[in-house]
Image: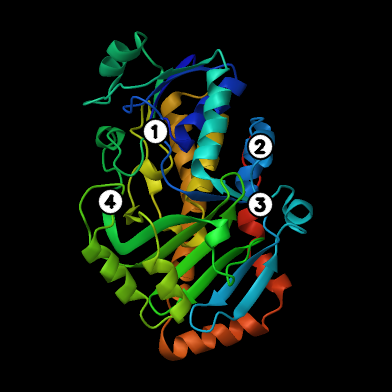
Amino acid sequence: MPIKTVAIVGAGIAGLTAALSFARYGIATDIIEQASELAEVGAGLQISPNAAHILSALNVLPQIEDMWLEPLSVDLSSGLSLKTLMSLPMKSVARSRWGAPYGVLHRASLQRALLAAVSSNPLCRLHLGKRLDNVDTHTIARTIFTQPDMIVGADGVWSATRYCVPNAPAATFSGNVAWRFTLQERDAPGFLNRHSVTAFLGPSAHIVAYPLTETGDFNIVAISVGANPGDTWKAEAQRQQKAFLLQQFRHWNPAFAQLLDGAANPTFWPLFQAGAGQWQDGRHTILIGDAAHAMMPFAAQGAAMAIEDAFELVTFVSRGEIIGASLDRFAAHRMSRVDKARKRAKLNSFAYHARGPMRIGRDILLSLRPPEQFLADFDWLYGYKAEGL
């Protein structure tokens, strides 16, 4: 049956991308967001070519290209010696090899660009400050004054929509915490590359650093084991927690102790992941993005997978099948790719946090393997062309 109206729960990257994707097919959407305003949350974000393809199709890419950085390379370096172990050219090869650029920017910059596109599209209606205690067609109809043909749960790892899907994935704490902060580029130490994305690898932890050209900051994310502070997106780092952070990096190069100790207002984000389960109810409700498959950030694909989900969902449901059948086909299609991305993140987690002899072997392998072989490993991920492109 043809779909005329869709309710999207959540106005994050997944929800806004979904609204724009539906609009391409002439389908109206109502985006329901519990926050009264879309605040700037998070920090840096990596947009790989597989996601950039989609943003280009939605006419959002030109707006963010004006402010982002296309890194010259993605580097893996030792957190002990600061030595570069591997450097993959990125700016010079991304467009030619994978057909789209690779860029880094502040998450808020992408959200603003998506929001501007949604706000200017007559088929997209945004409802802020609308908390849904129950996500069902009747409750939504009372909120948006129309009965939706379909419900898209794009409401993140703590999804309320998830409770409407039988046997949906459950969110569990991974045992890892991401410490996030930014510092002015003028204050950044010299070992941070001003033109590239660098992941510093060390025992049981790693740090990712890259510049944010639109804010003049350096984005720093330190990931290590940590305690679960409860069901929260983020928490302010108190003195005790900051001391724990420094303890995690005590065996690293002393330059990192100074960098972390001087971090102003760091936040720690407990990393939750969604396990196996159903993404759709067989009738009219579907989960996308973190609501369906929150994953560890070790492959920097959380946002990209959400963008792919949003875009491909519309391609599947616009084919005129019964909605339930379309959602089933979409979920089966996406689960295999998300599972592959999840496995890559798990492999990176093992490699990035290797200890002892495994760390030494990793460093040797990274130093000796030709960059072309590493680039080829990303062809399935970065070169992916979403259904509907």
Q: Is residue 140 above or below residue 103?
A: above
Q: Nearer the viewer, residue 77 or 384?
A: 77
Residue carrying label 1 = 286
Q: Looking at the picture, how far across and down is residue 232, in whole percent?
A: 26, 47
How many numbered marks are there?
4
Residue carrying label 4 = 235
- Local packing at callout 4 (Cα closer than 10 Å; few below 14, some 14-19, many 20+) is some
Query: What is the secondary structure assignment of the residue under circle 3?
Result: loop
Alpha carbon distance from label 4 to label 3: 30 Å
Figure quadrant of the C terminus: top right
Query: What is the secondary structure assignment of the residue under circle 1?
Result: strand
Q: Is residue 245 left or right of residue 65?
A: left
Q: Is residue 15 left or right of residue 279?
A: right
Chain-order first, disc 1 or disc 2: 2
Task: Specify the quadrant of the image occupied by residue 280.
Answer: top left
Q: Is residue 384 above or below residue 132?
A: below
Circle nearer the viewer, 1 or 2: 2
Q: Looking at the picture, how far across and down is residue 206, in whole percent?
A: 44, 70
Q: Which mark is residue 61?
A: 2
Query: What is the secondary structure assignment of the residue under circle 2?
Result: helix
Q: Is residue 87 left or right of residue 192?
A: right
Chain-order first, disc 4 or disc 2: 2
Residue type marked 3: Tyr
